[in-house]
Amino acid sequence: MRLRTFIGFGFLLTIPWWVSAFWLSEAQTWLIYALAGLSLKLLSQEVGLISLGHSAWLAIGAYGSALTLQAGGAWWLSLLIGVSLGAMSGWLLGWTTERLQGTSLTVSTLVAALLIQELLLLAENWTGGYSGISVDTPDFLKGSTDQHWSYWMSVVALAGAWFCWHQLQDSTIGRRWRASKNSSQAMCLGINPRRVRQQALVWSGGIAALSGVLLALQLQYLSPEAFPLTLSLEILLIGLLGSTNLWGLLCGAALIRFLPQLLAIVRMNLPLSWQDIPGLEPLIFGLILICWLWQKR
Amino acid sequence: MILQTLLGGLVQGCIYSLIALGFVLIYRATRQINFAQGDLLMLGAYLGMELQLWGVPWSGALLLSLLLLFLCGSLLQLGLLSPLPRGNPISVILLTLGLGFVLRSLATMIWGPAPLSFPNPYAQQLFAGQVLVISGGQLGVLMGSLIAWLALWTLLYRSRIGLGLRALAQDHWIAQASGVSRKQMEALVWGLSATLAALGGILLAPLSLVHPELGWLSIKAFAAAVLFGFGNVTGAVFGGLLLGITEQLSAAWLPDVSRDLVSYLILLFWLWLRGSNRIGSATFVLPGKS
């Protein structure tokens, strides 16, 4: 990690002392989005795989940790269970889609995400179905400065994931990932591209689930509607928009995260007859997606 | 009872197969996957409804909205998609997903988020037999799909345009060298699959309600298209029918499990089973003369 990154994380740590409670919780969500974007970026940059199913991993982490907390588990146990469930589902997806490539792999991540959503609704006894479940706040977050601690947890998680990724990039695993983009060359070097891709899916799933765990603590209430397909697309955009450094990732997350708020402000200043038109946000979102693809061309 | 369930599945399957045909047509000619297919279906249903509310008779509304969607599809291809780089299929997937968002929110803006009922053109006719009751809407779906399949088959295998399309699907260099215009053909194919989607929407609308989220159906239709190998026209038809019937049967036997779950499981299982890069590579099994 470079000095600039250290300074950046140090700066993020100081935020609770100089912003209001509202902006602090916004900043926390922002960091969680950045973390989810990082998990996707790991996949797209290292093994060249575009995932449309990251919201499902977030959901797995969130529900896993929330259920552990509900069963009386400690907070660190819930974190561990959430992350390992995400990593396991990454492994499972890698195993299921072992022989697929490119577009079909992307499509299968989409289908897997939809499947997870259906399963969440089906397991009504545990997940509460449509009505959802509430997330117990762990004891150490219940104090007067609780928001500070949960914010700092997100900063530490982002820094940890960032650090892990950079360590991985310079290790054998990272080099294998990059080599596996060209599968025939990789196979000549004795690398099994499928195994390697599965590893990347495990890491990405774990990190995405970590962000899901944090999101559960932030939202304090979970329902399948909290993880729509739009969330997957948002994460995808963060991962693709952000350049390789931390700054780019945070900017991408800020753009995606604060755009709805910005639109809400714009909407308030629109003429009265325009204010309650439904569906303005997805329209802008779709237009941004299209424009971005166009300018990239 | 079982016959009635099978009929319901067949009707649902017809709708799936119409959308699946759209997927396959576009994929064969352009190697692109259009994820806005379901939203074009939704748009077709809304247009059909709106035209009828304006006083256009049923058959006129049907033909007019098919024509409008044809134009819409070809313009989308010409204006939005053809300038994109060809090498990257992911960008087309993202673009069509974004387009889906735009279409859905436009529909929400114009017609509101609440489900609307489609004016029933069949005047509640029921064809009741000894063991089977067919409603007018169901009969409409069956007849309409049959006509669409036959028309498409004639176009693909009995006309010069179809010859050009099949040539383009096999080898676009040689096809272009023999005087097939790739640009025109691609616009035509996008128009055609938008028309098929619109037909599906208008046929489905009297049986269900019209709402902006109607297009999610297309994910399941995609499952149907993949079932017998992507890029196979007859496969898409039978895949759709099979998926529809499986769904209805599973809904009858396992009422607690959602029908969507079954189709997603089928799709994932099938992707896992057949593996070997069915969507990525060109596997065209053409019936008849090719």
Image (cartoon, helix red, strand yellow):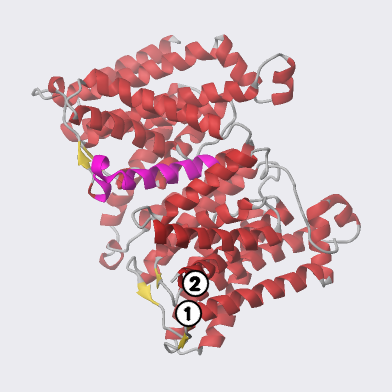
Residue sitting at 67 percent across and 39 percent down? B277
Identity of the amino acid at label 1? Leu
The residue tagged 1 is B132
Q: Nearer the viewer, residue A271 or A76?
A: A76
Give the residue displayed 78% in from the left and 55% down from the top. Answer: B169
Q: Is residue B121 magenta?
A: no
Tell me the magenta residue range: A107-130
Residue type at mark 2: give it: Leu
User: SS class of the residue under badge 2?
Assistant: helix
Q: Residue A220, how many percent across, how many down?
A: 20, 36
Tell me the element at label 1: loop
Residue found at the far right of this picture: B178
Residue B3 is tagged as 2
B63 left or right of B137? right
Q: Earlier in the sequence, mark 2 or mark 1?
A: 2
Report x, y in % for residue A239: 48, 33
Q: From what the image shows, is residue B234 above or below residue A79?
A: below
Residue at mark 1: chain: B
